[in-house]
Image (cartoon, rainbow, N blue to C red):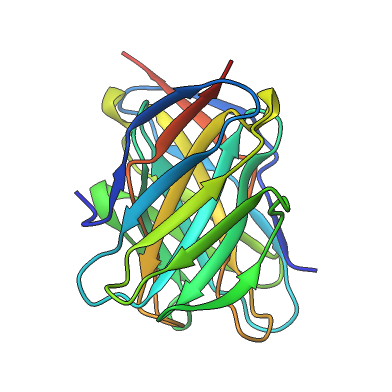
Amino acid sequence: AQSVAQPEDQVNVAEGNPLTVKCTYSVSGNPYLFWYVQYPNRGLQFLLKYITGDNLVKGSYGFEAEFNKSQTSFHLKKPSALVSDSALYFCAVRDRSYNTDKLIFGTGTRLQVFP
Amino acid sequence: DSGVTQTPKHLITATGQRVTLRCSPRSGDLSVYWYQQSLDQGLQFLIQYYNGEERAKGNILERFSAQQFPDLHSELNLSSLELGDSALYFCASSVYLAKEQFFGPGTRLTVL
């Protein structure tokens, strides 16, 4: 079965510092990986994806993610955090089963950026 | 704005009742997905439709059903509601087997 794990329930970082939100995956075959962000009382917003190609993927709002096949990881990163980045972040993998491309989500990591 | 719309935004109802949640996908997207977000279960896939046909079912209760209409909008029907059905219900759409899914703002269901 395919899955993703987000080992940290919460990440705290000071504004201006780099941030990392961790994600590891377990899939058979090549993974299609995604990061989404959820602000309070809002839907999920797509940040970035890895399908194939470069291991460093750039996305919205200055975020990037590094795909590491040997470590089965897809960590989300940003060089300089903003208070406005505070939100709930979800890593997801696309199910590769026959006839569906549904997303399987991690449990989410709450990012808190302090001024 | 993702282009996916959901109505209503909030729904408060009583146990045993039936409700219908509505979703309009982005223009041109044929695939619609329903997800449930709750504190104890996290984000769970419920069901997927593609161009009017059911494609996949996830952890969807027998009391729940859905359909996708010819104009591609979708409805999720929840019946015999229980307290534990209180959750945020998201609809997403995409071009099938391509790229990312785009999520609507969700419907927050509260069962009293």
Give the farthest residue toward the right.
Answer: A1
Q: Quadrant of the C terminus of chain B?
A: top right
Instruction: Point out residue B95 in the picture as x, y percentages from the top left corner.
Output: 35, 78
Count of marks placed on residues: 0
Q: Residue at x 58, y 26 (%)?
A: A10
The reply to whether residue A26 is visible in this rendering is yes
Residue A114, quarter of the rendered image: top left
For this view, does B12 lie left or right of residue A78? right
Q: Foreground residue, A15 or B82?
A: B82
**Image location of residue B15, percent across then percent down:** 64, 23
Q: Nearer the viewer, residue A101 or A7?
A: A101
On the rendered structure, is B91 left or right of A100?
left
Residue B11 location (% of width, % of height): 41, 27
Rendering quarter of residue A112? top left
Is any part of residue A74 visible from this angle? Answer: no
**Above/below status of A22 relative to B57:** above
Horizontal side, residue A97 vs residue A15: left or right: right
Residue drawn 58% across the image and 63% down it: B47
Whether A46 is drawn above or below A83: the answer is below
Q: What residue sits 69% from the left and 28% below the top?
A: B84
Image position, residue B42 (x, y; %): 64, 39
Q: In front here: A10 or B106? A: B106
For residue A94, above or below residue A76: below
Left/right of residue A84 with respect to residue A89 in the rendered view: left
Q: Hey, which quadrant is residue B28 in on the image?
A: bottom left
Please name whichever residue, B11 or B87, is drawn nearer the observer in this view of the structure.
B11
